[in-house]
Amino acid sequence: MTDLPQPLAVRTLGEGNRKILALHCTIGHSGAWRPLSVYLPDCVFTAPDMLSHGKSPDWDRQGDFQDRMTEAVLPYLTERMDVIGHSFGGTVALRLAVEHPDLVRSLTVVEPVLFAVAEHDAPEVLEDQNRASKPVFDAFEQGDEVLAARLFNRMWGDNDGPRWDEMPDKTRNAMIRGIHIVQASTGAVKDRVGLLKPDRIERADMPALVLRGALSPTIATVVNDGLAKRLPNAENVEVTGAGHMVPLTHPQETAAHLMRLFDRAPA
């Protein structure tokens, strides 16, 4: 990785002695952690906006996006912290845990899009997911990022959430702004850096939580189950009634699981 010339905007949430680095999902932003922070007393969240998201600058499209984001958030691991990552953010969180285990007190990944797990464990599920995702990538090929954002949000947003036409213009425009990151995440999805290699993933031996919503796409179950088996010290948890956006829609339940994890990883 090379020096990152683009600084990130960072939000701080909560107050307390326990420090958490929280990494959001694609077409989201750091404010998505606010509901969860309410239910975690004595915790302070450091929550960066990814490039092309929130108040951070647009990605300059140089290099590999996961490399760039890993490099960008590493300076915020100033000491041993709990690291939480959702979706694409989960792939960065796992990479931090593998490459810098001395700085990660506990690891939480919420439906990380590390589909390479499914390639190993259930290739037929990955084929189904690729078919389901094809309209999104067709829209990219046609140069229609508005349609790509709409379809991607429909695929990964919760069923009871607002529909595209019901969203404020500001929300839709933010999703359109960041949607190109889906294409840029291919390396992370395919595990280009080899996080799943046994001699690498075993380095992430800190207490870990692998979390998913019960209503999420099948591939989330395959990935989470596969990661829980590979991580040396992981608990695999499903939240009833939740989908992919479980930290946002079910913050109280998510916080309860995190507090149990924190009991296994004292500050």
Image (cartoon, rainbow, N blue to C red):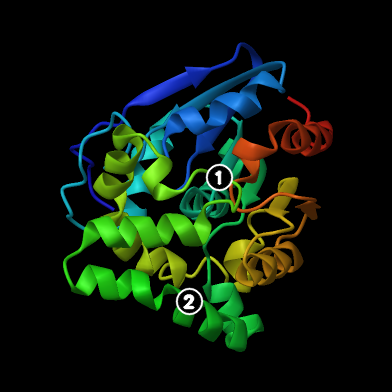
Residue 258 lies, in percent from the top left, at: 75, 36
Q: Amino acid at mark 1?
A: Gly
Nearer to me, 220 or 139: 139
Nearer to me, 183 or 200: 183
Residue 103 lies, in percent from the top left, at: 57, 37
* Label total for image: 2
**Residue 227 in sight:** yes
Q: Is residue 27 left or right of residue 113?
A: left
Mark 2 or 1 closer to N-term? 2
Residue shown at the point (27%, 49%) measured from the top left: 176
Secondary structure of the residue carrying tag 2 is helix
The answer to the question of whether label 2 and label 1 lie on touching residues, with beta carbons closer than 8 A, is no
Residue to which mark 1 is pinned: 161
Q: Is residue 194 above or below residue 202?
A: below
Specify the quadrant that holds the C terminus.
top right
Q: Is residue 247 above or below residue 128?
A: above
| Classed neighbour count for the residue bearing mark 1: other residues with Cα under 10 Å, few (<14), some (14–19), many (≥20) | few
Residue 69 lies, in percent from the top left, at: 35, 46
| Classed neighbour count for the residue bearing mark 2: other residues with Cα under 10 Å, few (<14), some (14–19), many (≥20) | few
Residue to which mark 2 is pinned: 132
The mark closer to the camera, 2 or 1, is 1
Q: Is residue 60 above or below residue 8?
A: below
